[in-house]
Each structure stands twice: as structure tokens, then as C-alpha cells.
Image: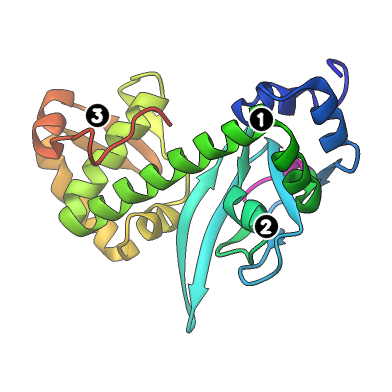
Amino acid sequence: MTDSPFAAVRHLDLFAQMSDEAFARLMRGAYLQSFPPQLQLITEGDPSDFLHVLISGRVELYSSWDGRETSMATVHPVSTFILAATVRDAPYLMSARTVEKCRLVLIPSQDARAVFEQDFGFAKAIVTELARCYRSTIRTSKSLKLRNSQERLANYLLRQLGKSGNRTRFELLAEKRRVASYLGMTPENLSRAFNALKAHGVEIDGSSVTIVDRDKLLSFARPNPLLDDYSN
């Protein structure tokens, strides 16, 4: 299994504690596939036929209604996405498309549910992952409701700063329009928010962000562990 294309999947927290027999059973119907950029992987409302595991590349989760569209999250490897729909045997609540060339392992949802009922390690890991996702959703909702656009952007930049290894200059991990959508604002509002953050130690040049004064940005953003999760 260590030499198989599923080796990276085995080391994910979701699969690490399950038995070898259960993992082999789960992977029996799975397959590895490559997808080009900007390809629709799933559509909200469709049945959740597969649990997706992203091995390489990036995937955008988004939703649309009445001609409007919003970005929900960007998935980075190695990780799964839309686990709850698989467990519940329910329609997808989000759509997904590739941002760049991606490699994914597709696991039939019915197999995942069968192993969930049989393997304690896998079941415990699923409950833990769903709890983590739930708490992350609550934090995001609180931030959208309690902070203004400048405060949301400031805390988003602090998270990106951490992901960059605390380098004072880094590239945005998504296009500005996706960042704006994720933060619940229009591209015009995002531009104004960036301009406002110049007074709080931030410089922007295209997609490149420079944190000129981290302490000043921290003082303005006031990150809070009940609203912000820096572990992801």
C-alpha cells in the first residue's frame, strides 16, 4: 500500500486509525483520476456519489442562486471535501471545480458508509472531522456577522501570513474576486478595504501582499480564538 497511489490517503487523519483490512476494502472501488483546470467536479443538488480526496492541485467550493455566486472555500491537498453529504447520503450543498490541474481519489460514497458502520477507528475519525468542520463554519458565520469588511480582510491576511511561514511578503492564495466572495464582499469593497488597511500596516501590489507593520495590523484586527482558527 505504501507504493500505491492511495498511500497519501492512508496518512490523512480521516483514514489513519482504521484497520488495514477496512482501508483495503474502502480503496477497492476507489480510483485515481486527473482533472484539468476549471473543470466542474460536482454540482450542488446532485447525489453525493463519491467522497473526494484531493491529492494535488486546488479545488474551489462554491454555491450559486438566482444568478449570484459565492465562494465558500478553497481546498488544498491532501484533504477530503464535502464529507457530510457522503455520510448522510444527501445531495451536495456546494459545487466544486478545479482551480488548477488536480489529481483526486474518488471513493464511492456507499463504500464509505459501509465501512463507517463497521470500523470504529474510521467512524471516530469521521465524527471528529465533522465536528471540526462544524466549528469552523460557526467561526466563519460569526466573523461575517460581527466584523466589518476591513476587519474580516485584516484577519484573513493574518491567517495567510501564518500559512506563508510568517514571511512579511506573500502572494494571495486565490484571485481577488474569490477572496472578496469568500469574505462576503464585492470586488469593489475588497479594493476599498485594502486601501483602508494601508493605515494599518498593509501594502498590496496586484496579488502580492506586504505586511509592513504586523503589530499595527494585529492591533486593528484583534484576532480572537472564538472567531478565528489558525490551525488550518
Mark 2 or 1, which is nearer the eye?
A: 1
Question: Please, what secondary structure does the residue beneath circle 1 have?
Answer: helix
* Residue 13 left/right relative to 18: left
Residue at the location (16% across, 55% down)? 146
Camera-side residue: 146 or 70? 146
The image shows residue 177, relative to residue 74, as above or below, that is below
Give the image location of residue 208, x and y in percent.
38, 37
Residue drawn 20% across and 27% down?
Answer: 212
The residue singled out by tag 3 in the image is: 211
- Where's residue 170, x and y in %? 39, 29
Magenta segment: 99-105
Q: Are marks 2 and 3 in contact (CB under 8 Å)?
A: no
Q: Earlier in the sequence, mark 3 or mark 1?
A: 1
For the residues labelled 2 and 3, the Cα–Cα distance comes to 31 Å
Could you tell me how far apart the alpha carbons at marks 3 and 1 are, in whole angstroms?
46 Å
Q: Which residue is mark 2?
A: 38
Image quadrant assignment for residue 199: top left
Tag 1 or tag 2, which sits nearer the N-term?
Answer: 2
* Nearer the observer, 84 or 104: 84
Q: Front-most of 214 and 159?
A: 159
Q: Name which residue lies at 61% across and 48% down.
A: 83
Callout 1, which amino acid? Phe
Residue at image mark 1: 120
Q: Is residue 169 one of those drawn in magenta?
A: no
- The Cα–Cα distance between marks 2 and 1, rounded to whole angstroms, is 37 Å
